[in-house]
Amino acid sequence: MSADNTTNISEPEEGWKALLANPYLAGPIKLVLPFIIALAIFAALYLIEPYQQFLVISGLLAAYFVPPAGKESIIPIAIVMGYPWWLVTLAIVLLDVAVSLFVVWNFDLALKIPLIGRLLESGMAAGRNYTDTRPWLRRFSTIGLVFFVFFPLQGTGAMNGAIVGRLLGLEKARVFACVCAGSLASSLIIALGADVILDIYRQDPALGTGILVAIVVAILAAVVGLKLREKRLRERSPR
């Protein structure tokens, strides 16, 4: 590679670094870009889906942000309603990208926004409880954060994942990468699993129902076990 080509490649990189280093430009970009990503998702869905189907999937994506809903419920529902698994996965992951970027870049500012600030404070409380009951997480912070976002349990989504990353003292880029990796892995597994179970159910309803019940029982048992373990750890910890 010639020196001229190297110079041409490095110039855009330096331009972006200079742009983000400018506080008068970086602040608005970091604030607005996550919303642009979210709006782009809905705009793309509007263009590729019939209007009624667009309204339905938009409602599901909006419900994704309302507890106790999460990817473990929204993705299977969307697939059962006939949406392609890859489309649902892509939409959910990109929403998590937008949310994690907003929290990572605008955490201090977001705390001052009434509604969003309360959500973040709630996430901080959940994050502290999560890290306090899992002291090993601070030793394996990166992989621990990926697993935190990966496991499809209430309160372990992109927003709380970004908050936990902040509590662990990780760099912003690493927090963002961990949240994206965990979101992509969990969304793919849930979507592909739901798609396979739906195919089995169509061929053999009894077998498909049995597999679904077994999965639900296993998840509930795991959740109860984790809650009991956390309770024991809180009781042992000094007050």
Image (cartoon, rainbow, N blue to C red):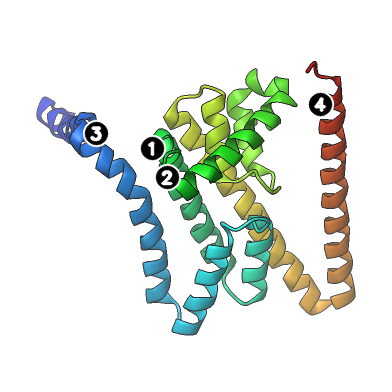
Q: Which mark is residue 113?
A: 2
Q: Amino acid at mark 3?
A: Leu
Q: Look at 36% across and 61% down and name the residue there.
A: 40
- On the picture, is 133 further left or further right than 113? right
Tag 2: residue type?
A: Ile
Q: Which residue is mark 4?
A: 234
Amino acid identity at mark 4: Arg
Q: Which residue is mark 1?
A: 109
Q: Is residue 31 above or below residue 140?
A: below
Among numbered discs 4 and 1, the one appearing first in the sequence: 1
The kind of secondary structure element at disc 1 is helix
Is residue 97 in view? no
Label 3 neighbour load within 10 Å: few <14, some 14-19, many 20+: some
**Pointers 2 and 1 in contact (C-beta within 8 Å):** yes
Q: Which residue is mark 3?
A: 20
How much space separates mark 1 and mark 3, taking CA atoms? 17 Å
